[in-house]
């Protein structure tokens, strides 16, 4: 992820990195190491050129997933279903 401008706290990321999850809304997957990812809820502002601006949820310099989203979304749904009360 890269800052939109040197004096701006907004981060610009590829639009494909943002997914809409059924619980919580827009999210990105932050790399935690060893093949693990953490879901971070984000506030998305539309942009141009295949990118979006994130106004909250992550900080500049954080590594986020930009591909393999269907696998990560499926894993997140599985995790959420195991956590929800039955």
Image (tube, rainbow, N blue to C red):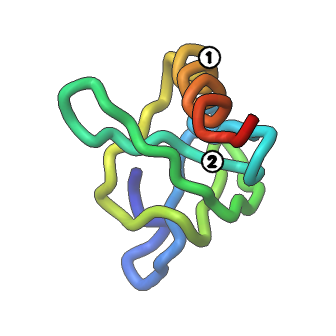
Which sits in the foreground, 63 or 23? 23
Q: Residue 19 at what x, y percent from top left?
A: 68, 37
Q: Residue at x 60, y 30 (%)?
A: 82
Indicate the quadrant where residue 21 lies: top right
Q: Residues within 10 Å of mark 1 (few under 14, many from 20)?
A: few
| Whether residue 50 can be seen here | no
Quadrant of the snapshot with the C terminus? top right
- State the separation of the CA atoms marked 2 and 1: 13 Å
Residue 30: give its label.
Answer: none
Q: Residue 47 at what x, y percent from top left?
A: 72, 54
Question: Seen from this angle, which residue lies furthest front?
Answer: 86
Would you say 67 lies left or right of 73 here? Answer: left
Which sits in the foreground, 30 or 50? 30
Q: Residues within 10 Å of mark 2 (few under 14, many from 20)?
A: many
Q: Circle 2 is placed at which residue position?
A: 27
| Secondary structure category for the residue under label 2 | strand
Of pointers 2 and 1, the one earlier in the residue sequence: 2
Which sits in the foreground, 76 or 17? 76
Q: Circle 1 is placed at which residue position?
A: 70
| Whether residue 15 can be seen here | yes
């Amino acid at each position: 992820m890269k800052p939109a401008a040197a004096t701006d706290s907004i981060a610009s990321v590829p639009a494909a990195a943002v997914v809409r999850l059924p619980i919580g809304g827009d999210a990105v997957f932050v790399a935690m190491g060893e093949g693990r990812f953490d879901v971070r809820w984000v506030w998305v502002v539309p942009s141009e050129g295949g990118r979006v601006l994130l106004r909250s949820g992550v900080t500049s310099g954080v590594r986020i997933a930009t591909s393999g989203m269907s696998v990560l979304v499926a894993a997140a749904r599985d995790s959420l279903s195991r956590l929800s009360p039955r």
